[in-house]
Image (cartoon, grey):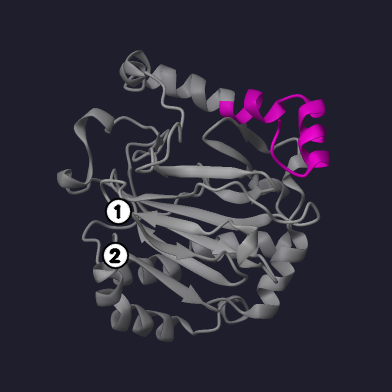
Amino acid sequence: MNKKIINKSSKDSILFAKINKAKYQNSKPYPHIIIKNFFDKDFLNLVLEEFPDLSKKQSSINYENKNEIKFANNDKKHFKKNTKKLFEYLNSTQFINFLQKISSIKERILPDQSLSGGGLHEIKRGGVLKVHTDFNKHPTKNLDRRINVLIYLNKRWKKNYGGELELWNKDMKKCVKKILPTFNTMVIFSTNDFTNHGHPKYLNCPKTTSRKSIATYYFSRGRPQNEVVTIYKKNRTQFKNRDGVENDVFIKNEFIKNKLRGISLYQKIKNFEKSYIRTGKSKMKRKFFSGRGGRVV
């Protein structure tokens, strides 16, 4: 099965990881690697053909605020054949071993079969994802988020469309790297409270296209304490202001929420809201957003 999915055999992918683990660790502004053409082109074409318009899927989550305008869908039971195969591979022992080797993380890496926060992501014209650090705890399990894997599906993507993944340094003074989200580009990076990333400029692609990606996140039981800021150790995404950009992001005063996040019942209510209420936002809003091809004004 895997020969149809990836270009390298299992043995070759582990060898690739051994050869490139130093490159991963030494990359700036934090450990990461960009891998071109890891997946079989014909197989990934099939995944792209199956990729739905997420703005029209009732099970999609529609994010519309100053910090993010995007669609996400992790409803696996409605994924089509080849998309399911891809996620099965990304959660397989073979791929986990590859991640373990290339990242050099000491704790055992664990997949997330529920695809919390992951799955299919789509950003249309006018969409945005401001620079942020990710939630560092699994929303329903006592696991620490350690690795992000992003796979881009965008053919003939032009630089002037925007949508580059930006990696920022720890103090948000400088964008150190920009990655064009082109077809069959996989980005793997370690994630903690200092791994700032996003695409903070509004997307300028034609209305007939969109920025499509696959996202999977990986966890461990425990992590080095120097990777988290104590005040943010509860589950949350933190958006960051870029240096020199006025009114860049909206930052809530979440003192009370941060206290509530430590209560399991609160987390269960939030998970229910994300799964059954937020996904059911008005069809009119979904239709409007799709028809305008992007940013709601």
What is the quadrant of residue 27 in the picture? Answer: bottom left
Number of other residues with Cα within 10 Å of mark 2, as a class: few under 14, some 14 to 19, many 20 or more: some
Kind of residue at disc 2: Lys
- Where does label 2 land, which residue? 28
Left or right for 121, reference 294: left
Q: Which residue is drawn at 34% across and 78% down?
A: 17
**8 or 181, nearer to the observer:** 181
**199 or 30, nearer to the observer:** 199
Question: Percent position (x, y) of residue 44?
Answer: 66, 71
In the figure, 164 relative to 202: above or below?
below
Left or right for 224, reference 281: left
The prevailing secondary structure element of the residues shown in magenta is helix
Please state the extent of the stretch shown in magenta in the rendering: 274-297
Q: Which residue is drawn at 65% across and 59% down?
A: 161
What is the quadrant of residue 231 in the picture? Answer: top left
Q: Which element carries disc 1, helix, strand or loop?
A: loop
Left or right for 18, reference 77: left
Kind of residue at disc 1: Asn
Which quadrant: the C terminus?
top right
In the figure, 173 relative to 59: above or below?
below
Question: Percent position (x, y) of residue 220?
Answer: 30, 50
Asked if labels 2 and 1 touch by Cβ distance under 8 angstroms, the answer is yes
Question: Percent position (x, y) of residue 191?
Answer: 34, 51
Q: Mark 1 or mark 2, which has the lower sequence index? A: 2
- Where does label 1 land, which residue? 169
Left or right for 139, reference 281: left
What is the quadrant of residue 167 in the picture? Answer: bottom left
**159 or 5, nearer to the observer:** 159
